[in-house]
Image (cartoon, rainbow, N blue to C red):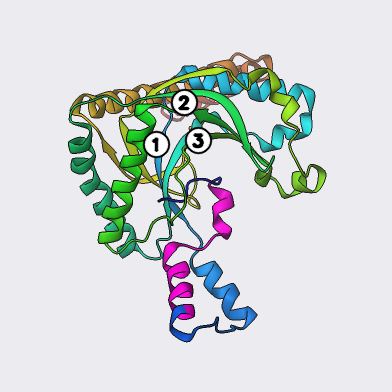
Amino acid sequence: MPFAETDIEDEFAMHTTSEINREKKRKRTTGKEIPESSERKKKKKKQYQPNYFISLPITNPEIAGNIRAVQDAIIQKDDRLSKAMVHCGSLHVTMLVMHLSSKEEISIAVGALSDSKDFVEDLLKGKTVDLSFQGIDHFKNEVGFVQLAENDHTAILSEIAETMRKIFHEKGILAGEERAFKPHLTFMKLSKSTQLRKQVKKIDSSLYEDYKSHYFGNEILHRFDLCSMLKKKQPSGYYYCESSVFLGKSHEADFVKEALHRETQALLSRLSQIKELLSTPDVRMKIRKELFEDGHNLNNKWRSYINSGSPNE
């Protein structure tokens, strides 16, 4: 199964399936583990660090709002943890992680994601997958996340993850490993700040005690993204996307509308900032001064032009 049990950034230190399988094969062939130099081990570890993942983005503002409320409540009790909070624009559920080392491999992964759409829609048979987020849990008191309520829809999501893993595997992209798929929604992690890790070793679960059974909202499954862990994030805080697939045509149209609305809002926000800047006394004074000076210079040039054309000159 995919290895989405740990947090995205924390998965960098883990080997992908290909490396693990090679280790097992070497042991089976020789009967013992062949010692390797530390330099070679470091090189292999770096080579197989995941740098891409399949994301199920969270687009319901109710979920984001509830998570923001939890984050604020925690920060009020321990402001050091403000550095651990995940931007609400990047909220997602990780389906698969993988290592893509070239443009060619990225292209293959894009194709695998595209191929996944038909298989997933065939699996769903027109049914809507309604994911319910309720309750808070943690990984080793280092990562805080919102849980998915266990039901038939969560079981379908696990089937989808396994189906996608097989499709990527058939394309030559080894994504995930034999680890139980535990979909979750990370909202806090100590790994976001090395400085914070020195100050806080464990997150005190009592900080979010009041929200341990809290209902955060539902997300209708409608999209999967192939995202980069390393490339610059979008202005919204969401990850850089190489490709996306939409489940159902209506959702694709909704995504276009959402993107247009987001761009329009960003433009309006920028215009509002410019308007506010222009309304400040200092800027208004500078504008008047420049207009007066320009007008004065223009009058002088006009007089000079008139005088130069006079027959008495």
Mark 2 highlights which residue? 149
On whether residue 232 falls in the magenta region, the answer is no
Element assignment for label 1: strand
Q: Amino acid at mark 2?
A: Ala
**Residue 307 location (% of width, % of height):** 47, 25
Q: Which mark is residue 184?
A: 3
Q: Nearer the viewer, residue 264 or 130?
A: 130
Element assignment for label 3: strand
**Residue 20 location (% of width, % of height):** 47, 67
Which residue occupies 48% across, 58% down? 50
- The correct choice, above or below, for 301 with respect to 18 in the image is above
Mark 1 highlights which residue? 56
Q: Magenta stretch: dominant SS?
A: helix
On whether residue 24 falls in the magenta region, the answer is yes
Q: Furthest residue to the front?
A: 31
**Residue 173 location (% of width, % of height):** 33, 61
